[in-house]
C-alpha cells in the first residue's frame, strides 16, 4: 500500500520561507515522477511543480517559478518543495502526489497516489 505523508507546513509571514517534505512508503519511489499540487479554500486544485523520476527534469507553475524549488532524494524516498518569497496567495493545502509513470507531468489525472496534505498559511 503506497503512502505519502507530507510535513513542513505552517504559518509564515509574507516574504518568508518554508520547506515541505513528502515521505513515501509502500512502493518503488525512484522510478516514478512526483509532484506538488495545492488547493485554496473555494478554489480548484492547481498544479505547483513536478519532477521526473531521476530529478533531471522539473516544471513549475508560472505563479511559483523562480520562488519554489522541487527536489527529491531517491535514497530516502522523499520529495521536497522549497518555498521562498512566500505570498498570501500561496496559502493553500499542499498535496504530494506520485505519478503513474516516470515522466514529469502537470496533469492531475497522470497521478495515482495522493497524500493528505499539509497546510501552508502566509500572512500579509
Image (cartoon, rainbow, N blue to C red):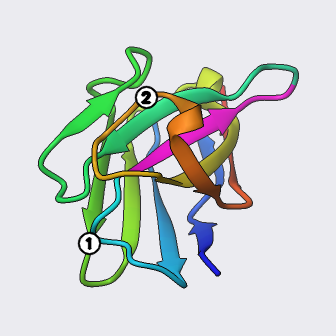
Q: Assign the C terminus to one quadrant of the image.
A: top right
Q: Nearer the viewer, mark 1 or mark 2?
A: 2
Instruction: Tell me residue 13's x, y (percent).
Output: 59, 39
Q: Say few, some or many: other residues with alpha carbon within 10 Å of mark 2 (under 14 / 14 to 19 / 20 or more).
A: some
Residue highlighted by disc 2: 106
Q: Is residue 37 magenta?
A: yes
- Magenta span: 34-41
Can residue 14 be seen in the rendering of this structure? Answer: no
Q: Assign the N terminus to one quadrant of the image.
A: bottom right
In the foreground, 114 or 72: 114
Please, what is the dominant secondary structure of the magenta stretch?
strand
Who's the residue at 39% across and 63% down the image?
79
Question: Going by the picture, which residue comes out furthest to the front?
Answer: 101
Instruction: Tell me residue 66's x, y (percent).
Output: 26, 26
Residue highlighted by disc 1: 73
Q: Up-down: is 50 above or below 85? A: below
Instruction: Tell me residue 34's x, y (percent).
Output: 40, 52
**CA separation, marks 1 and 2?**
20 Å
Which type of secondary structure does the marked residue at label 1 adopt? strand
Who's the residue at 31% across and 23% down the image?
65
Question: Going by the picture, which residue comes out furthest to the left?
Answer: 56
Q: Up-down: is 106 above or below 2? A: above
The numbered mark at residue 60 is none
Q: Up-down: is 4 above or below 112? A: below
Who's the residue at 50% across and 39% down the image?
110
Residue 57 falls in image quadrant = top left
In the foreground, 111 or 61: 111
Amino acid at each position: 500500500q503506497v503512502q505519502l505523508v507530507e510535513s513542513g507546513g505552517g504559518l509564515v509571514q509574507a516574504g518568508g520561507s518554508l520547506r515541505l517534505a513528502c515521505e513515501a512508503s509502500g512502493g518503488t519511489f525512484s522510478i516514478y515522477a512526483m509532484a506538488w499540487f495545492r488547493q485554496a479554500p473555494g478554489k480548484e486544485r492547481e498544479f505547483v511543480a513536478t519532477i521526473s523520476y531521476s530529478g533531471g527534469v522539473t516544471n513549475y507553475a508560472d505563479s511559483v517559478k523562480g520562488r519554489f524549488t522541487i527536489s527529491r532524494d531517491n535514497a530516502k524516498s522523499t520529495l521536497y518543495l522549497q518555498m521562498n518569497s512566500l505570498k498570501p496567495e500561496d496559502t493553500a493545502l499542499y498535496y504530494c502526489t506520485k505519478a503513474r509513470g516516470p515522466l514529469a507531468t502537470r496533469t492531475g489525472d497522470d497521478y495515482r497516489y495522493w497524500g493528505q496534505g499539509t497546510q501552508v498559511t502566509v500572512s500579509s
